[in-house]
Image: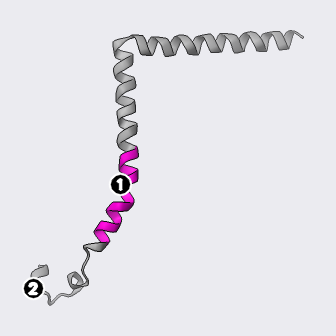
Amino acid sequence: MTTLTITRRNRIVLSVSASMLALALLVSPVGRSSVASTLDCFVQTVDAATEFPCKIVTDIRHFSPDRLDPTCPQCF
């Protein structure tokens, strides 16, 4: 029975602590700027990941077999 009480109390303390930390991040200017920069970095990463397959297809489309020919004058 005591273990159950301690577990519930720990869960409540953890929830309150997490809520206070989130509130502190959103209220302070430094916290807001750090959250905004983290979200911006996340968005840039997602954009880069979604554009990557398109970039591969575009690069392959512009590749010419003449580039491999050593006698092709415009390739050098």
Residue drawn at (50%, 16%) of the image = 22
Is residue 15 left or right of 49 when viewed as pictured? right
- At which x and y percent is residue 28? 38, 11
Q: Residue 3's mark?
A: none
- At which x and y percent is residue 32? 37, 18
Q: Quadrant of residue 64?
A: bottom left
Residue drawn at (34%, 29%) of the image = 37
Nearest to N terminus: mark 2 or mark 1: 1
For disc 2, the neighbor class at 10 Å (few under 14, some 14 to 19, many from 20) is few
Residue furthest bottom as drawn: 71
Give the amino acid at mark 2. Answer: Pro
- Tell me the quarter of the image containing the N terminus: top right
Is residue 25 left or right of 14 when viewed as pictured? left
Q: Is residue 36 above or below residue 46?
A: above
Total labels drawn: 2
Of badges 2 and 1, the one in the foreground is 1
Disc 2 + disc 1, Cβ < 8 Å: no
Which range is magenta? 46-60
Q: Quadrant of residue 61?
A: bottom left
Colour treatment of the image: one colour
Residue ID for mark 2:
73
The overriding secondary structure of the stretch rendered in magenta is helix
Is residue 9 left or right of 71 when viewed as pictured? right
- Tell me the quarter of the image containing the C terminus: bottom left
Callout 2 secondary element? helix
Q: Residue 51's mark?
A: 1
Give the amino acid at mark 1. Answer: Glu
For disc 1, the neighbor class at 10 Å (few under 14, some 14 to 19, many from 20) is few
